Amino acid sequence: MARPLHLDLLFLSATAALALGCSRRPSSAQGDLGDKGELTGPGAIAVTNASAAPSGAKVFAKAPRAACSARAADFRFPPVTAREFNVGECRTHDECTKKAPGYCSAHQRQPPHGFSPPSTCVYDACMSDAQCAAGSLCQCGDQAPNACVPGNCTRSEDCGTNVECRPSYGPDFRTGATGLYCETPKDKCGRGNPCSRSERCAFSGSRWECVFTPPLQPG
């Protein structure tokens, strides 16, 4: 006996609804998804799911950070002979012993007068984030010593997919960045959302916001 048409339509509707529900299952490619929709796991930032985030906001997990790799001193600070640079605190890496590891930072004499700054010993401040104070991370140096810098990232790879690590500046840009911070889903300014000419986009506790910038004083 043929099955009634209305039963066939009911079966097809139920199958389609089940397939649609499976296709909307959240992806866990950037982190594990918890029972309440939060991204969890190593290095994850506390970010709510897409339905709770502002329109157009990025939902991401922070990538795990690795310690700075141990690199040869001659790679980071190529040696030069005493005839090629202005000898100051050191002539070789081996003379920099106040802290390990130490490097002799020297610059070749530049023509036409052969001037160069005197050589100095430089030392790594850290090899991993654990060696930095709370609120700072270890930035691996490239032809510079490793340093602890304020913020929650030192490069965009620390933040997640399609999320930038940006420098935040104080009122006077000439003093340099006050720290490096990831973009967040709660940002009030940033890429494609500039501040007015009298403001700057700065990190303020948990997100990027437009902050009034007073005119710079001469000098």
Image (cartoon, rainbow, N blue to C red):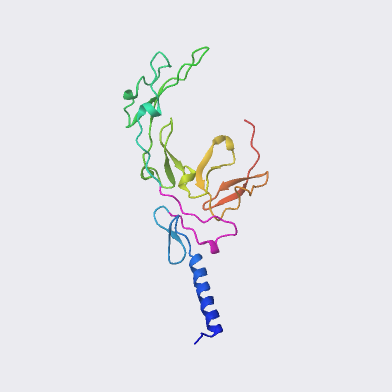
Q: Nearer the viewer, residue 155 or 215?
A: 155
Image coords of residue 193 (percent x, y) = 63, 49
Q: Which residue shows up at 36% across the image and 45% down it?
A: 130
Relative to 88, 52 lies left or right: right
Image coords of residue 44 (percent x, y) = 43, 54
Relative to 217, 62 lies left or right: left
From this view, report whether residue 41 is shown above or below residue 175: below
Q: Which residue shows up at 55% across the image and 79% down it?
A: 9
Image coords of residue 146 (percent x, y) = 41, 36
Q: Which residue shows up at 49% across the image and 44% down it?
A: 156
Q: How many marks?
A: 0
From this view, report whether residue 192 is shown above or below residue 124: below
Relative to 115, 197 lies left or right: right
Q: Give the extent of the magenta segment.
A: 44-64
Where residue 72 sits, quadrant-wise, is: top left
Location of the C terminus (image quadrant): top right
Q: Is residue 58 visible?
A: yes
Is residue 49 rendered magenta in the image? yes
Q: Nearer the viewer, residue 108 or 218?
A: 108
Q: Which residue ends up furthest to the front in the rendered image?
A: 1
From this view, report whether residue 104 is shown above or below residue 38: above
Where residue 29 sits, quadrant-wise, is: bottom left
